[in-house]
Amino acid sequence: MSEFTLTTFQWVPEWPRGHVRDLRIRWALEEAGLPYRVEGVPFEGRGAEHLAHQPFGQVPWISDGDISIFESGAILLHLGFRSDALMPTDPRGRSESMEWVFAALNSMEMATVPWSIFMYSGYREDTPEWKSLNDFVMARLKHLEPVLAKRDWLAGRFSVADIAMVEVLRLVDRLGGLTAYPACREYIARATKRPAFVKALADQMAFFAAAD
Ligand SMILES: N[C@@H](CCC(=O)N[C@@H](CS)C(=O)NCC(=O)O)C(=O)O
């Protein structure tokens, strides 16, 4: 089997380390035991070669032979189709995995990213705008909580859907947003005990530290 190449920034500031989205891809590759190497691109000054792979000048992207894929959700699904360890093979399990990957990114992360920017920047004055953004995120969590209270993994067994959802929730948790959602927190604890996550996190931290 050919080796995948995962591209991320060669260096990022301290704060986002442990949350840069190459982590979700590292985690999936580790779970599946797929061979890969990691390459770094400059954080400052994103050139034409970078934009040819990731049109928004972001990371990550992955190369699988002559296929280059950006968007972490698309990469997770691509890997899910490459390995049974990452996605059930029956039609129901596949559909459930795919719907929950989209739910993680399109129903949760689309709300949690602006919320995180407000939280991180300390821009949380008691304004109607902040309240409405916070209510929006809490409404999503309120609906996710009973789902996670009833099952260990979103698609019946561990899959790329859990990688996507846990990675979205971990950042919310780091910023103190999950205090009222014990099932979400237990889900994160369950998932982040997995050896593949532990290795992926350690590898990302070491990768950025090596460029300090
Ligand atoms: N929707 C994209 C988002 C990618 C993204 O936000 N990447 C961050 C790193 S985790 C980035 O490149 N930030 C720098 C920037 O946006 O300029 C995905 O899921 O791959």
Image (cartoon, helix red, strand yellow):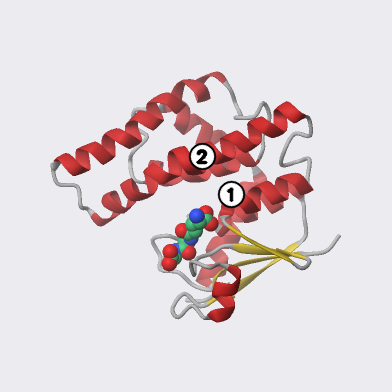
Report x, y in % for residue 88: 75, 34
> Does 171 appear above or below 190?
below
Q: How far is mark 2 from mark 1, CA to CA?
A: 9 Å
Report x, y in % for residue 50: 56, 75
Q: Residues within 10 Å of mark 1 (few under 14, many from 20)?
A: many
Which of the 4 image quadrants contains residue 127? top left
Badge 2 residue CB within 8 Å of ligand 1: no
Disc 1, SS: helix
- Disc ID at residue 84: none
> Does 204 appear above or below 117?
below
At x 75%, y 48%, the residue is 32
Which of the 4 image quadrants contains residue 44? bottom left
At x 33%, y 49%, the residue is 114
Mark 2 or mark 1: name the one nearer the start of the chain: 1
Badge 1 residue CB within 8 Å of ligand 1: yes
What amino acid is found at the position of numbered circle 1 in the picture? Gly
Asked if the residue under mark 1 is in contact with the one under mark 2, i.e. CB atoms within 8 Å, the reply is yes
> Does 113 appear above or below 166?
below
Front-lying residue, 5 or 136: 136
Residue bearing mark 1: 73
Front-lying residue, 63 or 201: 63
Residue bearing mark 2: 104
In the image, farthest residue toward the right: 1
Front-lying residue, 6 or 175: 6
> Does residue 57 appear in this view?
yes
| Left or right placement of residue 89 versus residue 14 in this view | right
| Left or right placement of residue 145 versus residue 157 in this view | left
What amino acid is found at the position of numbered circle 2 in the picture? Ala
Report x, y in % for residue 46: 49, 77
Disc 2, SS: helix
At x 77%, y 51%, the residue is 33
Q: Residues within 10 Å of mark 2 (few under 14, many from 20)?
A: many
